[in-house]
Amino acid sequence: MNATTRNDWTREEIATLFDLPFDELMFRAQTVHRAHHAPSEVQMCTLLSIKTGGCPEDCGYCSQSVSADSGVKATKLMDVRAVLQRAAEARDAGSQRFCMGAAWRNPKDRDMPAIIEMIRGVRGMGMETCMTLGMLTPAQAATLADAGLDYYNHNIDTSPERYGDVITTRTFGERLDTLENVRSAGINVCCGGIVGMGETREDRVGFVHALATLPRHPESVPVNALVPVKGTVLGDMLADTPLAKIDEIEFVRTVAVARITMPLSMVRLSAGRESMSEPTQALCFMAGANSIFTGDKLLTAGNRGDSADAALFAKLGMRPMQGAEPMRVCEAAE
């Protein structure tokens, strides 16, 4: 991996990429993308909330926080059989990757047996597995690795400098600690963030820089556009602000810079697609995005739906990634 990637990017270099003329940036991103990935293939993923609402964290963008007045009701952890049924439906609909999210600050030991069953059951269907359960201890990460989990998602959300303006119940450093626990256990890292939260271009530079200078790049980098939800801090703050929605060209630039700086990663076009135009999504694919979430719903936010995605792929001549096997878990860090 070290032969084809850099982990010593400076903020100045990343800022220079953001500032490139758009056609030049796209050319560079597409060149990098084609060197490492099939240019017309996109991995289809499905995301399921296995435990919704009631999260004690105060993430300003999240409708599942107990601090939000979003109308999302807290639920218990889903039954394992129900989760596996949803996974089978996703597989039959063409998904190669099944992601499971629980609205926890961190999982409790009593929940781990069910979590392990879910992982093993989904892997047994021939799908990649990913989970996002909040912060993990080294022992919890090792348990998930032993169960065969392919990826663990734990986003840094934004730049280190902006982080405290978005979340106060945990620190940026605690985010990095969980990433290290996941990596040390031998699980592939899924880590990205959200743009359009009122941040500046400098914050977007800092966000990409934080990811691109990790000792090993995340194997998966989701790039989300904020979906403002009424009742959340950011949703209420930005709802009536004309500049609340990130400029679509700026969003594409962020995807392109992520692709250039992390060439081997899967760059995942995640939340916010429901409101994106087809030309914007096409530009994101040209910029190096090669994974999307399918279906009508993400965790709690809406999504474009399978039929809309199929129609867009037909227009663009793109195809779902075929025959994907679950990735081998990466070697544990020494």
Image (spheres, rainbow, N blue to C red):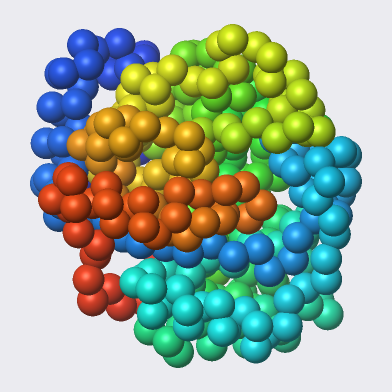
Q: Quadrant of residue 90?
A: bottom left
Q: Residue at x 65, y 12 (%)?
A: 241
Q: Is residue 243 left or right of residue 57?
A: left
Q: Residue at x 58, y 32 (%)?
A: 226
Whole-percent x and y of residue 239? 69, 20
Q: Quadrant of the N terminus?
A: bottom left
Query: On screen, 149 above or below 12?
Result: below
Whole-percent x and y of residue 97? 42, 68
Residue 292 seen by the camera? yes
Q: Residue at x 62, y 79 (%)?
A: 83
Q: Residue at x 65, y 88 (%)?
A: 81
Query: On screen, 263 above or below 25?
Result: below
Residue 165 seen by the camera? no
Query: Across the whole image, how many numbered discs are drawn on residues?
Result: 0
Whole-percent x and y of residue 38? 15, 55
Q: Is residue 138 left or right of residue 274?
A: right
Q: Is residue 20 left or right of residue 295?
A: left
Q: Nearer the viewer, residue 234 or 214?
A: 234
Q: Is residue 248 left or right of residue 67?
A: left
Q: Nearer the viewer, residue 88 or 211?
A: 88
Whole-percent x and y of residue 104? 78, 58
